[in-house]
Image (cartoon, rainbow, N blue to C red):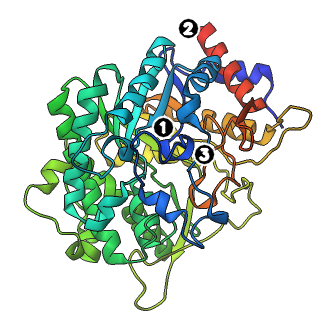
Amino acid sequence: MAPTPELAQELAQRFPKDFLFGVATAAYQIEGAAKEDGRKPSIWDAFSKMPGRVYQRHSGDVACDHYHRFESDLDLIKSLGVGAYRFSIAWPRILPDGRGTVNDKGLDFYDRLIDGMVARGLKVYPTLYHWDLPLMLSGDGGWTARSTAEAFAEYTDVVVRRLGDRMDALATINEPWCICHLSHLYGIHAPGEKSMEAFATALHTLNLAHGMSVQAARAARSDLPMGIVINAHSVYPVSDTPDDRAAAERAFLFNNDVYFSPVFKGSYHPEVLEAFGGMMDIRDGDLGIISQPLDWWGLNYYTPMRVRHDPAEGSDYPRTISVPPEKSPDLTDIGWEVYETGLTDLLKELYARYPLPVCFITENGACYNDEPENGVIDDRRRIAYLDKHFGAVADAVDAGVPVKGYFLWSLMDNYEWAEGYRMRFGIVHVDYETQVRTLKNSALWYRDLIGIHEEER
């Protein structure tokens, strides 16, 4: 059941007056123009064209054609009443080979995009890396090579010197868990590796790249607020037995702590080091680089993780099995459980465990594949999801968690990685044949929520 206008007003009033509402996208998922103006391939351009990797070999070659339609897309964003836009910069547009020659046409595009945001009064929240590693760097080992961390720092320097004067905040990396776990251990995302050694090596390289990027950005522009975006997991044991509770703690360390501890504490947990630290190539001084003080961090949350102990002898760390919830759960069209309490629980737990700066919810949203009927997309399930999760954020704020803003994923339907174009997360419907954008009812609901919040200020 969709929330009533009265409930929307009550919800809007729960957020601080300076709370920032925004929308989010990522370069490879929306830009298209994969071979234009000097851009060279990323690992996703290659991966998407390999049989069996991505649904029907869909690719980001055209995507939402945002590269050519960014002006009208910015008008669309402005029409929603949001105060900020989170997007990513495509490394292969800026340094097509990953290192070396800078492609000015790539920088020119982001100059125009950012200038367009500033002209419309939108705050600028870019992310340097949202998974589109220049393909040339995979020849050196990609994220398993320390040289990639150095290359990332060089790329950061180029971007910040050219564009940093108009940024409101900058994120280094989006969702390290997806880059390390999903891409190097489970083989689901590019480059599609299934190796504990590759995972462990990539994990440390990526953490190091983050720290080196922060150093490079601050050297170029010391006043730019720096952060990282982590898709932390709210982990629940399926029973209250000691074995399952211990399993949940191991799952937390394996999925969350491997990023939070080095970045915010300057160390890896002893259990992590015992399990696979020997594969990580940790050198003197690395943890000092990784743990650069941050001005903010971003949390991406969609669904909880439920685990039990894996009793199998010789099972790999963290020796857990993921288990679906026992009761018939509310699932989105991608099969993810809707559990808004997980967002509140996770925020509170993370702030109890780590010395964290202020937080933004940098992604939250739901996949529902509603199509237009008589020109209307009545995606009431998405509205219900968003209503619950905004309430969960407000609960966290009430509990003292310093959440300063929320970026809804996603502005528009787009390329959903291994799922291709069959999964729709947008509050704006995209007809991929015509590129026509249509506001879904969820977009109207979000616009109204923001409007009520503005009136209350």
Which label sits in the foreground, 2 or 1?
Answer: 1
| Mark 2 or mark 1: whose residue is earlier in sequence | 1
Label 1 – label 3 distance at C-alpha: 22 Å
- Residues 36 and 126: in front is 36
Residue furthest to the left: 284
Q: Name the residue under label 3.
A: 63
Q: In which quarter of the image is the N terminus?
A: top right
Q: At x 13% / y 50%, what residue is drawn?
A: 288
Q: Quadrant of residue 155?
A: top left
Decide if residue 102 is on the left or right side of residue 385. Answer: left
Query: Do labels 2 and 1 touch, CB within 8 Å?
Result: no
**Residue extending farthest right:** 374
Q: Residue 457 carries which label?
A: 2
Q: Is residue 71 above or below residue 306?
A: above
The residue type indicated by label 1 comes to Thr
Q: Position of residue 441 (x, y in %)?
A: 78, 30
Q: Mark 1 points at which residue?
A: 362
The answer to whether any part of residue 173 appears in the image is no
Q: How far apart are marks 2 and 1 (CA)?
A: 23 Å
Q: Circle 3 sits in a helix, a strand or a loop, which is it?
A: loop
Label 3 is placed on what type of residue? Ala
Amino acid at the residue labelled 2: Arg
Q: Position of residue 208 (x, y in %)?
A: 22, 54
User: Going by the image, does 442 lie left or right of 364?
Assistant: right
How far across and how far down the image is residue 190, in percent? Answer: 46, 64
Rendering coords of residue 275 (x, y %): 29, 76
Q: Which of marks 1 and 3 is in front?
A: 3
- N-terminal label among 1 and 3: 3
